[in-house]
Amino acid sequence: MNVLDEIRRRRTFAIISHPDAGKTTITEKLLLYGHQIQEAGTVKGKKSGRHATSDWMEMEKERGISVTSSVMQFPYADKVVNLLDTPGHADFSEDTYRVLTAVDAALMVIDTAKGVEERTIKLMEVCRLRDTPILTFMNKLDREVRDPIEVMDEVESVLQIKCAPVTWPIGMGKNFKGVYNLLTDTTVLYKSGLGHTIQDVREIKGLDNPELDAAVGAYAAELRDMLELVQGASHEFDLDEFLAGRLTPVFFGTALGNFGVDHMLDGLVQWAPEPQPRAAVERSVTATEPKFTGFVFKIQANMDPKHRDRVAFLRICSGRYEKGIKLKQCRTGKDIRLADALTFLAGERENIEEAFAGDIIGLHNHGTIQIGDTFTEGEMLQFTGIPHFAPELFRRVVLRDPLKSKQLQKGLTQLAEEGAVQVFFPLRNNDVILGAVGTLQFDVVAHRLKHEYQVECAYDVINVATARWVEAASERELEKFREKAHDNLAMDGAGHLTYLAPTRVNLQLAQERHPDIKFRETREI
Ligand code: GDP
């Protein structure tokens, strides 16, 4: 296959969901369809006692790094699918947000018993920054869930995206019978207890087919009535609207029962876009350009002190990676030869010596690579759209040995550059304040300060609710604001003026009082 075809068949996406909605379970089933794991066993290894059939675990052991579920690549139909993990529960961090800048589409998973939850709302906001196309999977239909129409309405009103049901559920809980596909006019029947296999499903063509009545009884008539309502209350699928991020195709099913995930996957490979063009400061870069370009969106540190190695995850934006390729790191101007990039097609990693636009490769990093770094075959480029996100959690750093404050500064500045945490230096005193979006980030930083910089620190709570990067049209205005708001201002690790608001109300008042000042929730790296 030639390079262009390889690029065009890439589909790179991530899952956005609230914890416990079913992301891990869906990932397992996706891999099952990708035939990477014959029996969907464990992805994170947290579920059953059975041990990982997957090769990432091996890779993890061998290389002493945790790449287990960061990137998963699998073939499906005639496409190559890259699924990027969005760290969830405890490991929720800015990385979670930034992963979304490296994908071309996202799958939103909703627990239909719960509806739209808080984490999903936030992740959707991030997808909005790039108008990422979104597919939706309404999960857990094998349970008593909420009225599907009501949940769909909630998605439309809370997330401001139009819903186009592709499938519609028949019954729920113990009486979950299957789904009707509105586009193909076919009913697919559900059998419970087959979650670990790819099922031979029974399909019934046509809504008025008497076979349907025979198969699901009174639910058939209910479905026919319901569909009229559904069609009135929703939108028809429209590819352009989907690609513009304004409409989401909706699928129903149960990940645990492995039912419906394949319908979604079919939709994904059919409709989700091929690797999209990326904006750089200098120009827009098209995926099918022959020369390699890419940017780093995540750096994964190892918590194990024996392995100080870190991995930088790079999204290839154009061209092709091959073993031994010579690349320029545009920020430093340095040339490097890449012989040992990690690729993520499980099972075949020995043979994989190349990767294409849309793929993710892992670079070994000894502290020289930062989030946002652009790599090319020589052209000077800087990809844009890899932001810092306003932190929501704050701690004051308490140094155990005051003589080490220089080392602390150095360590924190480097860790902030790497994207592990954000650091703020208030104008009014000598405090050092850390900001994060997930609590684990603070632990990681304390651990790494100790082991990599020999600085021991503890944290104090501090009265900061949120941060905004401030900008003004003129230096004069900014100077005026700096005087007025002095006590709430700080410099961040990269020297940008930041407003640290003790409360949300305070932020709102500041915004009203200073209409000429822009309070930004994100800052470009
Ligand atoms: P994550 O936190 O989003 O990764 O969610 P998990 O995949 O770990 O799922 C959370 C819990 O919901 C687990 O106990 C799963 O077994 C369960 N779960 C996931 N999908 C389904 C489903 O379709 N039906 C039911 N009944 N439970 C499910």
Image: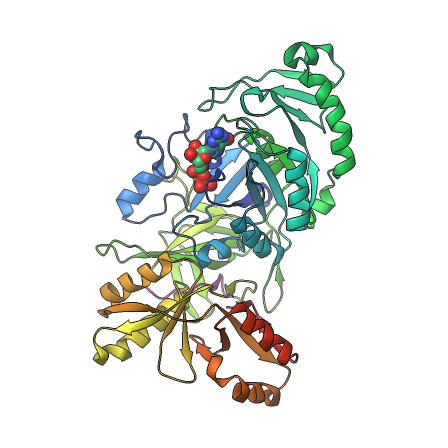
Q: Percent position (x, y) of residue 110?
A: 56, 40
Q: Percent position (x, y) of residue 359?
A: 50, 47
Please state the extent of the stretch shown in magenta in the rendering: 366-378
Q: Percent position (x, y) of residue 117?
A: 55, 47
Q: Residue 339 magenta-drawn?
A: no
Q: Specify whether 431 is left or right of 379.
A: left
Q: Nearer the viewer, residue 514 or 383?
A: 514
Q: Nearer the viewer, residue 109 or 283?
A: 109
Q: Using the rendered image of the protein, determine whether residue 24 is visible from the camera's viewpoint.
A: no
Q: Residue at image x 38%, y 50%?
A: 90
Q: How many marks?
A: 0
Q: Residue at image x 35%, y 62%?
A: 442
- Which secondary structure type mostly characterizes the magenta part of the structure? loop
Q: Using the rendered image of the protein, determine whether residue 59 is visible from the camera's viewpoint.
A: yes
Q: Which of the colour schemes (rainbow, by chain, secondary structure, one colour) is used?
A: rainbow
Q: Specify whether 490 is left or right of 147.
A: left
Q: Specify whether 164 is left or right of 4.
A: right
Q: Nearer the viewer, residue 8 or 16?
A: 16
210 vs 297: above or below: above
424 vs 152: above or below: below
Q: Which corner quadrant holds the N terminus?
A: top right
182 vs 103: above or below: above
Q: Residue at image x 37%, y 33%?
A: 42
Q: Residue at image x 21%, y 69%?
A: 454
307 vs 463: above or below: above
Q: Percent position (x, y) of residue 105?
A: 59, 47
Q: Specify whether 73 is left or right of 306.
A: right
